[in-house]
Image (spheres, coloured by chain):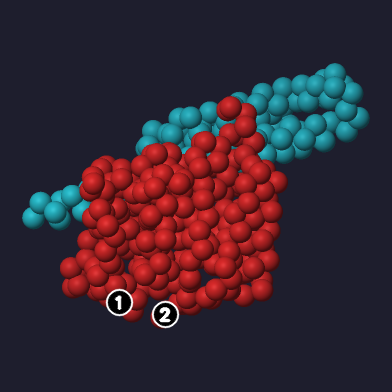
């Protein structure tokens, strides 16, 4: 069997209390025929995230300014592509995405079941299911995606995703800045990539407050909707 | 020449001078100054040749001549603000790209140490 290289991209904004546990869990992780490299990306945290990463000896990138979740994850894709990784996984640095679930995303990729594998909470409806308001937002973007590109991804805002090299290449060219997940689905479909949703368990944040994704506001709903809509029009116009 | 005309001409010349100074000092890029110089020149023409505004208003069929001035400048400023938003968005993308490259380079350097 050929050995494949997998990069795990973990964007961190003020996650000093979460990175150590995650680092230890990821180091224990093993997937057949796959070498695993966790890459933390410190998005200009104001706490001691950077120092903690240095002390535990984790491989990490250090943003010179705050890029937000989109620019940070995209940086991970750039790193993966430049360094010849076959697959990349993005997962939150706050403990919401358990490393033990990671193989569920990677195995379909290795079997060529899709170019993009999205971890979903809502297929088997197990684990942390999020609040009603968030659910409304997630369903709304699911509906929007279905309406625009005819693909039904239930957990449209899930940030627990795995990509093959083909998908990584496309994401280097375009990835939205803030709240990028629903819009990225539309982009990837237009690029002709095959997206598959698989069931995973998610938990609530372990420690700290969620500041890298804020989803409470109407502003984000409107912004993402507009972004997605215009992206769709643009990509349709360009063929 | 009326008093107000003289005041207007002095004010416009001062305005053009200010823009020129900014360009020479490198505080304002020429591409962003063109619209301001153009506005200054138009102001100057109207200040020196007072009847021009009435003639123009008559030509366009505008009853109240100053309304034409307001409309024109409102329109110009509107276009320029959109232009600034476009410039801003472009810079946003460029800064993001630079920051990403810097983060990658920082990692490469620390690898070599």
Label whose residue precedes the other's in the sequence (1 or 2): 1
The residue beneath circle 2 is: A206
The residue beneath circle 1 is: A21
| Chain with colour red in the figure | A
Q: Which mark is residue A11?
A: none
Residue A64 picture quarter:
bottom left
Q: Name the one closer to the observer, A5 or B40.
A: A5
Q: Is residue B39 above or below residue A2?
A: above
Circle 2 packing at 10 Å, graded few (<14), some (14-19), many (20+), is: some
Q: Residue A88 location, x and y as percent? A: 35, 52
Q: Residue at x 27, y 57 (%)?
A: A32
Q: Residue at x 32, y 58 (%)?
A: A8
| Chain with colour cyan in the figure | B
Whether residue B24 sits left or right of residue A199 in the image: it is left
Q: Chain of mark 2?
A: A
Residue A12 picture quarter:
bottom left
Q: Is residue A175 above or below residue A134?
A: above
Q: Residue B51 location, x and y as percent? A: 79, 22
Q: Residue at x 74, y 32 (%)?
A: B72
Q: Is residue B51 visible?
A: no
User: In the rendered view of the protein, which quadrant contains the N terminus of chain B?
Assistant: top right
Q: Residue B12 location, x and y as percent? A: 60, 34
Q: Chain of mark 1?
A: A
């Amino acid at each position: 069997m050929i050995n494949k290289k997998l990069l795990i991209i973990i964007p961190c904004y003020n996650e000093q209390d979460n990175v150590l546990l995650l680092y230890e869990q990821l180091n224990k992780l093993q997937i057949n025929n796959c070498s695993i490299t966790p890459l933390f990306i410190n998005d200009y945290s104001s706490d001691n995230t950077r120092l903690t990463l240095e002390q535990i000896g984790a491989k990490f990138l250090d943003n010179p300014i705050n890029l937000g979740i989109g620019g940070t994850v995209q940086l991970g894709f750039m790193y993966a592509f430049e360094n010849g990784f076959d697959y990349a996984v993005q997962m939150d640095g706050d403990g919401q995405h358990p490393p033990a679930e990671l193989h569920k995303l990677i195995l379909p990729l290795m079997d060529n079941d899709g170019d993009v594998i999205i971890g979903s909470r809502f297929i088997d409806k197990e684990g942390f299911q999020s609040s009603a308001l968030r659910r409304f937002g997630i369903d709304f973007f699911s509906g929007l995606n279905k309406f625009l590109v005819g693909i039904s991804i239930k957990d449209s805002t899930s940030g627990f995703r795995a990509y093959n090299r083909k998908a990584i290449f496309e994401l280097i060219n375009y990835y939205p800045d803030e709240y990028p997940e629903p819009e990225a689905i539309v982009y990837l479909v237009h690029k002709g990539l095959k997206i598959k949703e698989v069931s995973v368990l998610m938990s609530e944040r372990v420690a700290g407050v969620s500041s890298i994704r804020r989803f409470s506001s109407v502003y984000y709903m409107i912004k993402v909707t507009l972004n997605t809509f215009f992206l769709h029009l643009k990509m349709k116009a360009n063929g | 020449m009326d008093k107000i005309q003289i005041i207007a001409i002095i004010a416009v010349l001062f305005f053009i001078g200010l823009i020129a100074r900014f360009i020479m000092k490198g505080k304002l890029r020429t591409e962003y100054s063109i619209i301001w110089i153009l506005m200054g020149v138009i102001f100057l023409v109207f200040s020196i040749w007072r009847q021009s505004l009435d003639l123009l208003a008559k030509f366009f069929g505008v009853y109240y001549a100053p309304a034409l001035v307001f409309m024109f400048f409102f329109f110009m400023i509107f276009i320029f603000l959109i232009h600034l938003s476009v410039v801003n968005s472009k810079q946003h993308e460029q800064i993001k790209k630079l920051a990403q490259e810097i983060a990658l380079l920082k990692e490469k350097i620390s690898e070599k140490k």
